[in-house]
């Protein structure tokens, strides 16, 4: 319907929530493919100080190094989905 009306859709997807597993990451990727948006952005979830996500993670004891937390979680994601493999899977 949107394609017939020449409306282009952008999908934004976040990976790396504290409870994400390889299975949930696969589900998100499958959902992105199913939606078949003209454009898609994939982001590594970041819990910024002051955000609800940060507060929830802090209460759960999941904020352990404030400066390296972002780098560590993104590295975990890149180990699950190497960039070249991920690019091939989206095409």
Image (tube, helix red, strand yellow):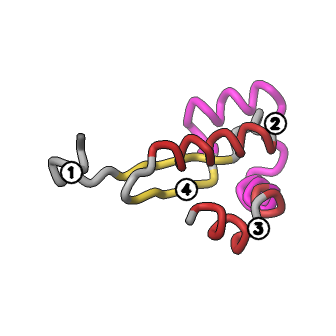
Give the CA separation, mark 3 to mark 4.
13 Å
Give the image quarter of residue 30: top right
- Residue underneath mark 3: 82
Residue 62 bears which disc, if any?
2
- Of the image marks 4 and 1, the number of the one nearer the N terminus: 1
Q: Where residue 89 sits in the image (x, y, percent)?
A: 65, 62
Q: In which quarter of the image is the N terminus?
A: top left
- Of the image marks 2 and 3, the number of the one nearer the N terminus: 2
Q: Which residue lies furthest to the bottom in this view?
A: 84
- Of the image marks 3 and 4, the number of the one nearer the N terminus: 4
Which element is circle 2 on? loop
Residue plotted at (63% across, 69% down): 87
- Of the image marks 2 and 4, the number of the one nearer the N terminus: 4
Which element is circle 1 on? loop
- Residue underneath mark 1: 7
Q: Which numbered disc, 3 or 1, marks the residue closer to the eye?
A: 1
């Amino acid at each position: 319907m949107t394609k017939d009306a020449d409306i282009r859709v952008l999908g934004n997807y976040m990976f790396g929530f504290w409870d994400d597993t390889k299975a949930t990451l696969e589900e998100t990727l499958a959902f992105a493919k199913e939606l078949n948006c003209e454009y898609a952005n994939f982001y590594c979830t970041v819990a910024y100080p002051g955000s609800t996500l940060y507060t929830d993670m802090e209460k759960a004891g999941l904020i352990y190094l404030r400066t390296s937390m972002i780098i560590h979680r993104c590295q975990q994601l890149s180990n699950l989905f190497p960039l070249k493999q991920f690019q091939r899977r989206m095409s």
